[in-house]
Image (spheres, rainbow, N blue to C red):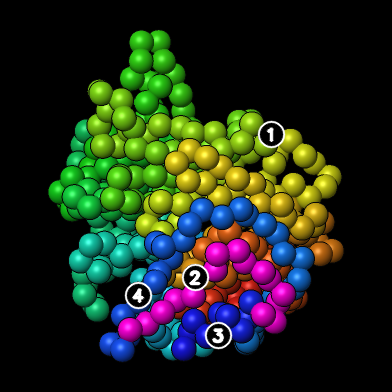
């Protein structure tokens, strides 16, 4: 049924896709033809607006105290929102229609939300008050039990403490190893025993540092784990946007990564990163920081160290987040137009795993931060704004 909806949406929006492969279900409902069967296609921008089947502003779970820094909606009815400015963590059991604050009273900043390999929620941020003061990574073991896995402190005194300002990104690899990056500087820490102990902070994880007289230090904005290992995106405002792959250096540890410049024509961070096909293809977005008083957003699709730029609308100024449905076909990206105060935010839509993009026809405020997809349902969050709908 969902495949028919996508085909109708393509027709209504006038988007012609070469080698389109619709999802086919066998009599038992098993996907026969999925995103993995895509042949490489040329990327394109479709100027025809996309009209969602439903869209509505919802109550802001952060209560206008802080921006929404993390959205996680992994299953039907279940969703979590993480807030900045100490506004905490909020849980919904009705697809975002209502929320309950959990872990209250801790002046909690939440920058990333994931589940570990056992399906336990991991809350990545910093608690600045209350009984969890100093906690950087908190895991929900069951409905009422929470475990503080990582603290701010000196690793030589406590092996579950590390001197990083916050937990900005967290991921777990196929061996169960955890990696945490700070979101204010490029420091990482890792755990090989399910979060019981952690390594001292490490800033020189890029594999140039493994060479004699080699030096490199970078910021990671997004972190993911694939079958090949940990990958990330980032850089800084003075370097080209970068994608970080697992290092192939003979002296590398599992946490070493190798930088890959996705463009020589842009300077600035890759803020957004997601994959539609379990790491075969990546979509990265951000802003060219060398361009001041005009729109300078970028969106790249890459496979095997070959990156292609999506020709965006001339108003797109920064792409802050991107997400794909579980099957990889549907994708959304959010950010701001230029100038943001006058033209607000945007949502970009792809119906073909990132090959072709168009802009959703909805009115949005500026400072959009995050997007989440669950099937054809979606949620977007920003500074004092939360909305959802259905593609």
- Dot 4 alpha-carbon crowd within 10 angstroms: few under 14, some 14 to 19, many 20 or more: few
- Marks 1 and 4 sit apart, C-alpha to C-alpha, by 40 Å
- Marks 3 and 4 sit apart, C-alpha to C-alpha, by 17 Å
- Dot 2 alpha-carbon crowd within 10 angstroms: few under 14, some 14 to 19, many 20 or more: some
On the image, the x and y values in percent for residue 198 come to 23, 42
Q: Looking at the image, tell me whether mark 4 or mark 2 is earlier in sequence order.
A: 2
The quarter of the picture where the C terminus appears is bottom right
Q: Looking at the image, tell me whether mark 1 or mark 2 is earlier in sequence order.
A: 2
- Marks 3 and 2 sit apart, C-alpha to C-alpha, by 14 Å
- Marks 1 and 2 sit apart, C-alpha to C-alpha, by 33 Å
User: Residue tagged by mark 2?
Assistant: 21
Q: Which mark is residue 5?
A: 3
Q: Is residue 113 left or right of residue 253?
A: right
Seen in the picture, residue 294 relative to 351 is either above or below; the reply is: above
Task: Name the secondary structure under disc 4.
Answer: strand
Report whether residue 384 is seen.
Answer: no
User: Residue tagged by mark 4?
Assistant: 32
SS assignment for the magenta stretch, majority: loop
User: Residue tagged by mark 1?
Assistant: 265
- Dot 3 alpha-carbon crowd within 10 angstroms: few under 14, some 14 to 19, many 20 or more: few
């Amino acid at each position: 049924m969902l495949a028919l909806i996508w085909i109708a949406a393509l027709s209504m929006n006038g988007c012609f896709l070469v080698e389109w492969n619709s999802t086919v279900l066998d009599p038992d409902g098993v996907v026969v033809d999925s995103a993995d069967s895509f042949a490489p296609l040329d990327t394109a921008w479709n100027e025809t607006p996309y009209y969602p089947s439903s869209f509505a502003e919802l109550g802001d779970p952060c209560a206008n105290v802080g921006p929404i820094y993390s959205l996680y909606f992994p299953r039907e009815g279940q969703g979590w929102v993480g807030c900045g400015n100490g506004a905490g963590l909020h849980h919904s059991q009705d697809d975002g229609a209502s929320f309950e604050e959990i872990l209250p009273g801790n002046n909690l900043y939440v920058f990333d939300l994931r589940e570990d390999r056992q399906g336990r929620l991991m809350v990545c941020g910093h608690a600045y008050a209350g009984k969890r003061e100093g906690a950087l990574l908190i895991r929900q073991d069951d409905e009422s039990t929470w475990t503080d896995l990582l603290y701010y402190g000196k690793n030589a005194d406590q092996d579950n403490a590390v001197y990083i300002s916050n937990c900005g990104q967290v991921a777990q690899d196929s061996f169960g190893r955890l990696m945490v990056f700070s979101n204010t500087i490029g420091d990482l820490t890792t755990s090989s025993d399910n979060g019981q102990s952690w390594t001292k902070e490490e800033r020189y994880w890029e594999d140039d540092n493994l060479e004699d007289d080699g030096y490199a230090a970078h910021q990671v904005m997004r972190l993911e784990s694939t079958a090949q290992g940990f990958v990330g995106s980032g850089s800084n405002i003075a370097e080209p946007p970068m994608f970080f792959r697992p290092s192939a250096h003979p002296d590398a540890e599992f946490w070493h990564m190798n930088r890959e410049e996705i463009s020589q024509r842009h300077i600035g961070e890759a803020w957004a990163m997601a994959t539609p096909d379990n790491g075969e293809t990546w979509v990265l977005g951000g802003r060219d920081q060398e361009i001041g008083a005009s729109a300078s957003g970028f969106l790249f699709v890459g496979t095997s160290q070959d990156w292609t730029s999506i020709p965006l609308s001339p108003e797109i100024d920064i792409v802050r987040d991107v997400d794909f449905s579980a099957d990889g076909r549907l994708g959304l990206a959010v950010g701001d137009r230029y100038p943001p105060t006058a033209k607000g935010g945007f949502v970009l839509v792809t119906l073909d795993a990132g090959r072709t993009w168009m802009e959703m026809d909805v009115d949005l405020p500026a400072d959009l931060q995050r997007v989440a997809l669950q099937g054809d349902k979606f949620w977007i969050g920003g500074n004092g704004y939360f909305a959802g709908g259905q593609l």
